[in-house]
């Protein structure tokens, strides 16, 4: 039952006061009261609550819990899963916490969950874009907020997720995932300046297309050098935490070329760390390669050396980022005639759409042109 009644009282100073009290009982039988200075405000609130109660979307907590409360509870939940060794890495925990604390909380932290709307979330996105926050970061932030609200729904704090369906639109071409692989000339220059260890690492990455986190987690037991293939099933992050691949599709078998397999077989014989559980590309002590250290201590000096060498010989050098070696591998697979679905499998992409969004522009279009020619000839044959 929901009622709106006028309440009058006298203050300690003898002043007469009045207000309109809206009282109702929720689905769990709990009584609630709210006070308004005007009757129309109380009636509007009664209409709103009555609709929520009748449709089952009313949550008492939503009127008291804020977006900050939802963020706090979600991060606490992630920390608990992380401490138990569940599928929440340190990297994911830090990134998610930073997105919610830095971008969401200052704008929406004080907003009650009952008052949070899709418009509020859209305005957050617009505000972040106006502050020159990158499109991808904004989209990821909204995604993190959506997951925090989903957790609040699971706790019965709120009935709907205001962030679901919110789209952050960028300018034409902005945020495009299409990639441009390094040129053969740039890769050749990089290899020419590299020592044997770096050559081996670079050539492997450029041939297999493994992500850095997958390459540094690779152990000898993952390689079948006789059958010339490797199995990708683990990754290691910057904090030294080992986990399964990014998605189920990340678990895959990648063929090895003869040259690559022969080089790895030679390397295993020479390496001090050749046991089944040893890393294929270890650090100097036999541990896994920490990617941040590797970039700073190995790749950056190599890029500088390559640039100086090319400059001395009158050539321009375009720096090659480590992840670009993965793009180079995919571009070579496309040149070799592999079909998009095969590319998706070898690259370990979660969906076919990801493959085409990033590499679709690299596939040759001659077949399309020939197909259109054939259709045209059929349609207009014999002067039709």
Image (tube, rainbow, N blue to C red):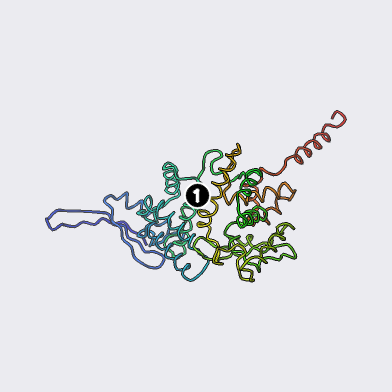
Residue 264 location, x and y as percent?
68, 61
Furthest residue in direction right, as rendered: 382
Q: Of helix, strand and loop, which one carries label 1? A: helix
* Count of numbered circles in the view: 1
Direction from residue 382 to residue 152 in the image, left or right: left
Please identify the quadrant where the C terminus is shown: top right
Residue 341 location, x and y as percent?
70, 53
Q: Which residue does the image show at 70% across and 58% down from the upper left?
A: 260
Furthest residue in direction top, as rendered: 383
Depth check, front residue: 234 or 82:
234
Residue 262 location, x and y as percent?
72, 60
Depth check, front residue: 144 or 252:
252
Quadrant of residue 29 in the image?
bottom left
Please identify the quadrant where the N terminus is shown: bottom left
Q: Which residue does the image show at 61% across and 45% down from the upper left?
A: 179
Furthest residue in direction front, as rendered: 312
Quadrant of residue 66 in the image?
bottom left
Depth check, front residue: 199 or 256:
199
Q: Which residue does the image show at 38% across and 52% down from the upper left?
A: 108
Q: Name the residue under label 1.
A: 139
Residue 323 location, x and y as percent?
58, 51
Residue 318 sits above or below residue 245 on the image = above
Dot 1, how many residues are within 10 Å of its Cα: few (below 14), some (14-19), or many (20+)? some
């Amino acid at each position: 039952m929901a009622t709106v009644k006028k309440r009058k009282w006298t203050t300690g100073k003898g002043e007469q006061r009045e207000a309109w009290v809206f009282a109702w009982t929720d689905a769990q039988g709990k009584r609630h009261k709210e006070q308004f200075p005007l009757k129309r405000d109380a009636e509007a609130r009664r209409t709103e609550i009555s609709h929520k109660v009748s449709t089952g979307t009313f949550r008492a907590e939503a009127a008291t819990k804020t977006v900050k409360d939802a963020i706090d509870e979600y991060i606490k939940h992630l920390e608990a899963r992380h401490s138990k060794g569940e599928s929440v890495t340190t990297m994911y925990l830090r990134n998610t916490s930073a997105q919610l604390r830095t971008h969401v909380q200052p704008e929406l932290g004080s907003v009650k969950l009952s008052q949070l709307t899709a418009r509020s979330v859209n305005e957050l996105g617009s505000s972040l874009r106006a502050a020159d926050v990158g499109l991808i970061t904004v989209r990821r932030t909204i995604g993190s907020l959506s997951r925090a609200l989903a957790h609040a729904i699971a706790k019965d704090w709120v009935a709907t997720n205001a962030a679901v369906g919110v789209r952050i639109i960028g300018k034409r071409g902005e945020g495009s995932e299409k990639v441009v692989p390094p040129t053969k000339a740039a890769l050749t220059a990089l290899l020419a300046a590299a020592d044997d260890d770096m050559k081996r690492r670079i050539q492997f990455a450029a041939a297999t297309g493994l992500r850095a986190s997958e390459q540094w987690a690779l152990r000898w037991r993952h390689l079948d050098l006789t059958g010339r293939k490797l199995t990708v099933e683990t990754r290691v992050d910057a904090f030294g935490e080992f986990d399964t691949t990014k998605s189920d599709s990340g678990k895959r078998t990648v063929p090895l070329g003869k040259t690559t397999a022969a080089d790895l077989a030679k390397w295993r014989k020479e390496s001090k760390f050749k046991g089944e559980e040893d890393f294929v590309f270890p650090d100097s002590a036999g541990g896994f390669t920490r990617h941040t250290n590797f970039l700073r201590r190995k790749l950056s000096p190599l890029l500088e050396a390559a640039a100086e060498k090319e400059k001395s010989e009158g050539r321009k050098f375009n720096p090659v980022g480590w992840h670009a070696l993965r793009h180079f591998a995919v571009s070579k697979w496309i040149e070799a005639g592999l079909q998009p679905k095969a590319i998706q499998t070898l690259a370990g992409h979660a969906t076919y759409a990801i493959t085409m969004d990033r590499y679709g522009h690299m596939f040759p279009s001659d077949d399309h042109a020939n197909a259109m020619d054939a259709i045209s000839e059929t349609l207009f044959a014999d002067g039709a």
